[in-house]
Image (cartoon, rainbow, N blue to C red):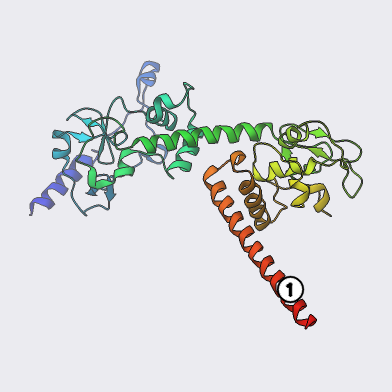
Amino acid sequence: MSQRNRRRAKTAAKTETPATTTTAPSTPAQTAAAPIHTPAAQQPTRRPRRRLPPVTHTTPGIIGPSGVGTYDYEARTTETTPCRITGQAVEPGVGRVVGGWREHPDAPRTAGEIVRAIIGERVTDERVTDAEAVAACEAAYGMVPLYWRWEGTSAVDVPEAEPWSFLGDEDRQRLADALAEHRRDVQRAARLRRSSTGRGCGWCGVRTSARWTKLGQSWRFADGSRASLCQDCAGAYRWGGLPSKHDPGWRSRLLMLMTGLRKPYLGDGDRLNVRAFIEVERGDYTGTDRPFEYVPRETLHELRVQSWGRHPQDAPDEAKARVFARLLREREAAATRRAVEAEREREAATSGLRW
C-alpha cells in the first residue's frame, strides 16, 4: 500500500463515527442532561476558503499575472528607495509598500494636501479641497503629479534629495495659476445669471453676467424689447456720461471693449463702422456664450490692427501693437503709391487728349 493510500485510509478511519446504542432517559434529570442531536441536513455548512493566486511583479510598481516575472522584495526592503508620492528617500523598514513602491510616513495622502504641499506659499488659503485640487492638476499637467507617475518605473531606485524636487519652479507656478483660474471660474459661475428680459447684452451679446443695467427707451431690439448691458459693457457705457442710441461717441466705447484699448477715441468707432449686438442680431436674441461672438474673427482681427496700430500706447499688448503700427504704415505707404500712380495715369490720359 502506497503512502498516499495509507494517509487516505487513516483520514477515513478518523471521520467514521462508531456505532453506539442510545438509551432513552428514564428520569427527568436524565432527560435534562441528555445531549441534543441535530440532523446533519440541518447543520450549517461552512464556506470553503478560496486561496488567492500569488501575485508577482514584472517591474517594481507594475502588477503582472501569476507566474510571470519576479519581484525582489528583499532588495526593496533593505535599500533606500524613493517615496511613490513625493520622491524623497525612504529608509529601509519605514512606511508602507504600495504596488512595489514605499510611501514616506509624512507624505500627503489626499489631492488637496498634495497640491498644498507642492505650491506652498503661492496659495494664500490654508485649505485646498480635493475637487479643486484635481481640477487644477488636470488643467496644469493632465494628472495628479505623483512621483511614480511623473518619473515612471525607470526611477524606482533613484530617490530625490528633497520632497517634490522632481517638479521645477515653472511646474509649481503652472499649478498655482491653474488653481487660481479654477477658483475664479467657480466664483464667476456662481454669480452669473441671465437678464430679466431673457435677452443677451445689447452691446457685446453675452447672455450671462453678474450684474445687469437696463438701458433707456431708445435702446431696443427689433422685437421692441428693451436692451440691458452686462457688467463690463455698463462700465464703458458710463464713460463720460450716459449716451442715447442717437448720440455720437458710444461706438468708440464699443470699439474699446472689442479691441481691449485702455480708453476710447472719439470718432474711431464710427470710422470703422462697428456694430453692437442690438443692431446686428435679427432673430435669436438670447445671446452668446462669450462677448462679441457675433462678430466674425476676421473682422475682430482687423479692428485690433486698426485700433492698436493707431494707438499703441493704449494697447494691451505693446509688442503686437508695434507690429500692427508697422503694418498700418506699410498699408498707408502702399495706398499713397497707388494714389500717385493713378494720378499720373489720369494726367497722362488728359495730356494725350489735349494733343
Query: Residue 302 location in percent, x, y?
Result: 65, 55
Relative placement, left or right, of 120 versus 154 is: right
Please state which amino acid type lies under the numbered disc 1: Glu
Q: In the drawing, does residue 223 fall left or right of residue 257?
A: right
From the top left corner, tell me how far across and down residue 218 is, in percent: 91, 40
Q: Nearer the viewer, residue 281 or 255?
A: 255
Frontmost residue, 317 versus 23: 317
Going 18% across and 29% down the picture, which residue do you hit? 91
Which residue is most to the front? 355
Confirm whether residue 39 shows in the render: no
**Residue 100 falls in image quadrant:** top left
Q: Is residue 123 above or below residue 197?
A: above
- The secondary element bearing badge 1 is classed as helix
In the image, residue 314 lies at what x, y percent?
62, 39
Image quadrant occupied by the N terminus:
bottom left
Residue 338 appears in which quarter of the rendering? Answer: bottom right
Packing grade of label 1 (10 A; few <14, some 14-19, many >=20) is few
Would you say residue 6 is visible in this rendering?
yes
Give the quadrant of the C terminus: bottom right
In the rendered view, does 203 fall on the left or right side of 290?
right
Q: Which residue is mark 1?
A: 347
Q: Residue at x 48, y 27 (%)?
A: 128
Instruction: Residue at the far top: name it.
Output: 29
Q: Name the one closer to the observer, 296 or 240.
A: 240
Residue farthest toward the bottom in the current orientation of the protein? 355
Q: Quadrant of residue 231?
A: top right
Q: Kindly identify the residue that appears in the image at 58 percent across and 50 percent down.
A: 325
